[in-house]
Image: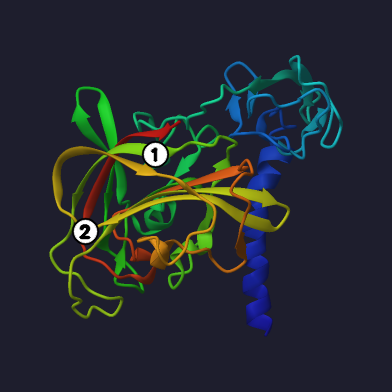
Amino acid sequence: MKRSGQLTAILITFILIPSCIEEDIFGLSGNKQVRAFEIPGQAGPTTINPADNTVIVPFAEGADVSALAPTVIEISNLASIEPGVGEVQDFRETVSYIVTAEDGSVAEWEVTAVIAEPTPQLENSNFDAWYDAGGYSQPGESDNNTLWDTANPGLAIVGQSNTTPGQVSGTDLAARLVSIRAPLFVRMAAGTLYTGSFTDGFPDPTDPRSNITFGTPFAGRPDAFRIDYRYLPGEQYLDGDGNPLPGSDEADLYVLLEKRENDQVERIGTAWLRTADRVEDWTTIEVSIKYGELTSMDPEFAYTNILAGESWGDPGDRPTHIVVVFSSSALGDSFTGAIGSELWVNNFELVY
């Protein structure tokens, strides 16, 4: 017990030393960034531009933004902000927020609510923008300005990534997702790209979804989604234990429209393509969104049913979130699939 306590104390010391050095020895912090800003009812992810101290919050067509209070404001450590969380503002005009750093210096941030057109699209849905996340690439302009994520942060812990930018022609990039041999504990890791975020921390090797929060704010009612894709299934289709399976690996490309209130999640619409077809040349497909509850008559019913903790919602409701997922191995979360399966996606578009 004594040795364990000594080791714990040493570890805590090493954790605390950097923050002490940064703030105490080298002076007070001058950081005054806005890192996150959310308002209930917004129709998409917030865009934060540190270069010009602006925050853009999107809203659906016809939204009333005259009296809204942000529920999430994250700023630099040791800084303060005015107005604060929960304070009602009239966002029909740009609202100024003052961030004061620990050293007393201030920065003015301008927050603007933008009312959407009736046919909203998702930012960077052509997958041309990628940024360096520290040894691997991620889709988007930066970590603060993207609605797309991958499982790369988890794989990068052991030095790998399997969702990368791939060149189509010239400056036209696509997302390339590859199922790879897993480095630890499990057989394989499917390439994934989705709206949402991969949370910090070492992932649970038995549950690939444990570190993923799916979905992004969205309030449109599209009729379908359209996308360019290629799919090259791997040669050996195996289960999670490495046993051969009949058939071939399959790719997943799907969109879920959800209405979320507090802890309640209701499915409003579903569009799902699961395919084993080998598609070597770029092909454009359009998948219709079915609003309301799916039945056993729907061919995709077996794998698109709602999850535990969810329910079917009113098909006439306006969604609050959209979940978009692409995977090189449809059953990759159970480590079933073929190593080497390769899915390319480009030019995702919501059709109205």
Looking at the picture, tell me which residue is in the foreground, 342 or 151.
342
Q: Residue at x 18, y 66 (%)?
A: 248
Report crowding for label 2: few under 14, some 14 to 19, many 20 or more residues within 10 A (C-alpha): some
Relative to 287, is 38 on the left or the right?
right
Residue marked by disc 1 = 225
Residue 323 in the image: state x and y as whole percent.
50, 47
Residue marked by disc 2 = 276
Q: Are marks 2 and 1 in contact (CB under 8 Å)?
A: no
Q: Quadrant of residue 301?
A: bottom left
Q: Is there any visible trace of residue 136 in the rendered image?
A: no
Does 202 sit above or below residue 216?
A: below
The residues bearing labels 2 and 1 have C-alpha atoms spaced at a distance of 19 Å
Residue 336 in the image: state x and y as whole percent.
30, 70
Does 190 sit above or below residue 350?
A: below
> What mark, if any, has residue 139 been given in the picture?
none
Q: Residue furthest front?
A: 297
Q: Residue furthest bottom?
A: 1
Q: Quadrant of the C terminus?
A: top left
